[in-house]
Image (spheres, grey):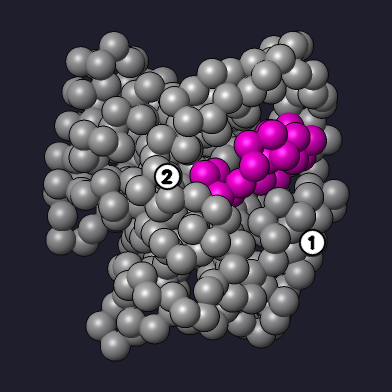
Amino acid sequence: MLNDELYCFYFVPIFMVHGFVVVNIEKPLMKRNGMQKFSGTEPKLGITMLATCNTLPPSQLAQEVEGRGFDSLWLPEHSHIPSSRATPFPGAAPGREELPDVYWNLNDQLVALAMAAAVTEDLILGTAVTLVAQHDPIWLAKQLATLDFHSQGRLEVGVGFGWNREEYEAHGHDFSDRYTRTKDNIGIMRALWTQDEASFDGERESLEPSWSWPKPSRNIPLLLGGGSGPRLLSHLFEWGDGWMPIRSPKGSFVDDVLRVQRLAEEAGRDPASISITVMNAPQSIDELEELGELAVDRVVFTIWPQEPDAVLSELDRLAGIADSFLSRS
């Protein structure tokens, strides 16, 4: 069984060799540059990369991703990395315990996605993930609503609780409160997105009656990153639109998915209403097909930030895998 705390793998070095998958089907059958895109239950295909100052700029990356027929681009975030960090780096491979320096060279996530939105037409713009509890919820609600409004409903938001205590507490909050603060911030954001005169009263955070526009073009999907423990699932079933589990090569991922679907029903949620995002997706076509059989329908491949020509070559390689996979679907 996956542990709640494993959510943090979503934006740590496993990016170097793996991808993740997201369930959320919105577009009809289409074809661009030879790659098929399917409606129904067949997977869609996207890309994630740590957007830094030393690789393709977000605008060019987005154009290259969309031009090869991928349907989505997903960008992570860290506000900063305290040099005095004592929090262990979770998910590190043996011999790679140090945090790679790309993590303190990240572009601002939402500015980068705005750049991507400006030069693309259909590309889904995803956050992987947004550390909601580190943000002022009023400003974050405004930023996300503005991005979704002006991109005509192309935003999807992955929600993470954060793993780096020093980073989190530099924002003035107690690390132990991050679950509650995330829930309250989500409540404030959704109130601002859906109510003309918005208000919210949470356990730790509240919002006095307020006006704020623009409203998003639609209900922005919120996909919750984590394991399958009771604490995380209680948040998922209460306010999440999607689940982002971590697929371990040694774990029983099928059992975890079936368990979450069963617990969703017991909690009064229709399992079909909960999208599934699987971190650490394989690039094996047979294993990708197995994920499709579990109703996983978006595969987001990972590219490690590197020289622009190397990124383009990796995009070409992944597009080849995508073509082979979709031709068998």
Residue 43 drawn above or below residue 152: below
The image quarter containing residue 294 is top left
Residue 141 drawn above or below residue 244: above
Q: Position of residue 226 (x, y in %)?
A: 34, 46
Q: Mark 1: few, some, or many residues within 10 Å (few <14, many ≥20)?
A: some
Left or right of residue 176, residue 125 in this image? right
Q: Position of residue 17 (x, y in %)?
A: 40, 72
Under tag 2, what secondary structure?
Answer: helix
Q: Nearer the viewer, residue 144 or 201?
A: 201
Under tag 1, what secondary structure?
Answer: helix
Q: Are marks 2 and 1 in contact (CB under 8 Å)?
A: no
Q: Nearer the viewer, residue 119 or 69?
A: 119
Q: Which residue is mark 1?
A: 59
Three-letter amino acid code at the position of disc 2: Arg
The image quarter containing residue 55 is bottom right
Q: CA distance from mark 2 to mark 1?
A: 32 Å
Q: Which residue is mark 2?
A: 178
Q: Which mark is residue 271?
A: none
Q: Residue at x 57, y 55 (%)?
A: 171
Residue 254 drawn above or below residue 99: above
Residue 131 in view:
no
Q: Position of residue 1 (x, y in %)?
A: 14, 46
Q: Position of residue 138 (x, y in %)?
A: 69, 34
| Residue range of the region highlighted in magenta in the rendering | 123-147
How many labels were placed on the picture?
2
Disc 2 versus disc 1: nearer the observer:
2
Q: Which residue lies most toward the bottom here?
A: 95
Q: Residue at x 17, y 32 (%)?
A: 259
- Is 217 colored magenta in this rendering? no
Q: Residue at x 29, y 88 (%)?
A: 95
Residue 322 drawn above or below residue 254: below
